[in-house]
Image (spheres, rainbow, N blue to C red):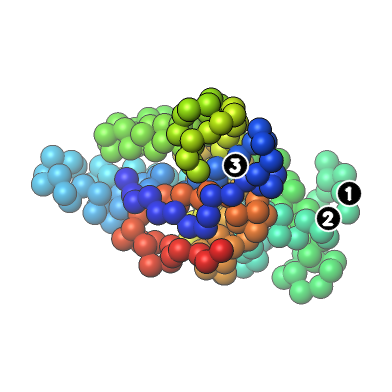
Amino acid sequence: MGDTMRIGNSMDTTGNREGSPKLNVYIWDMDETLILLKSLLNGTYAEPFNGLKDVQKGVEIGKLWEKHILQVCDDYFLYEQIENCNTPFLDAFSQYDDGQDLSDYDFNQDGFSPPCDDINKRKLAYRHRVIAQKYKKLWDDLYDATDNYTDRWLTSARACVEQCSGRNKELTSGEDSAGGISDSPTKFQHINVLVTSGSLIPSLVKCLLFRLDDLITSANVYSSWEVGKLQCFSVDQGAIQRPKCPVLCDRRLDGKSVKPRKP
């Protein structure tokens, strides 16, 4: 599914105080790692099966996903309005959000334009807040068809993320820990972060359609479209004080951008 590479150092976010929680953050790539789309659309997923997979069926499944992703982007996530305003993550302009009640807000009539001034930055922050609130699941039938065609790729990917999610475990005295032998019980907290080369809004839509939204929150989805993956890794590690960060990705696509980061 991909290669596991480690960046940064194993660190305790609470200063290594005895008995305090340690934080593990798992950084995932999306396309061709957790989900399949491009390889379905261009037929390369089926090629290694030497005729055992119907190439055209895979292409048709990919086209259906592409249609649904764009439909959700436009109909629910205001993508037509903000397609040219890609940001690395949804909270990028949160400091401009004044908390206004948006229940009756008309996004089609607020005169939004590219966020070059504080007024439009606030309008973009409004849109990002609404998008975060709409982050949820849809379309089970297509998911099942894709999972069957790809020999449970999606189920396996979800199981991997789920295994890394929210599984706080205690290491009792005598058990091996990340730093060696533990003399006292130590709790570990686990967080999944998605860093994708795709644009932010379609990537959020992919997360919810491919059933990853309950494992990876919208706040932990990062787009390297404008800034590059190393910058996203830096932002993420800075926000969580550089815990242990395994990076799980498709080496063919991302191996060159995942490099050890000096302490």
Q: Is residue 188 visible?
A: yes
Q: Which residue is at a point 82% across and 59% down the rendered structure image?
A: 95
Circles 2 and 1: CB distance less than 8 Å? yes
Question: Is residue 245 shown left or right of residue 149?
Answer: right
Circles 3 and 1: CB distance less than 8 Å?
no
Q: Amino acid at mark 2?
A: Asp
Residue drawn at x 72%, y 70% is: 114
Q: CA distance from mark 2 to mark 3?
A: 30 Å
Mark 2 secondary-structure assignment: loop
Task: Out of 68 and 149, give the one closest to the viewer.
Answer: 149
Q: Nearer the viewer, mark 2 or mark 1?
A: 2
User: Is residue 51 toward the left or the right of residue 253 in the image?
Assistant: left
Residue to which mark 2 is pinned: 97
Q: Which residue does the numbered mark 3 point to in the structure image?
A: 23
Cα separation, mark 2 vs mark 1, equals 8 Å
Disc number for residue 220 = none
Task: Classify mark 3: residues with Cα within 10 Å, few (<14), some (14-19) or many (20+).
Answer: many
Residue at figure coordinates x 36%, y 34% from the top left: 156
Reading the chain from its start, which is encountered first: label 2 or label 3? Answer: 3
Q: Which sits earlier in the primary sequence, circle 3 or circle 1?
A: 3
SS for callout 1: loop
**Residue identifier under label 1:** 100
The x and y percentages for residue 99 are: 87, 49
Cα distance in 3D space between marks 3 and 1: 34 Å
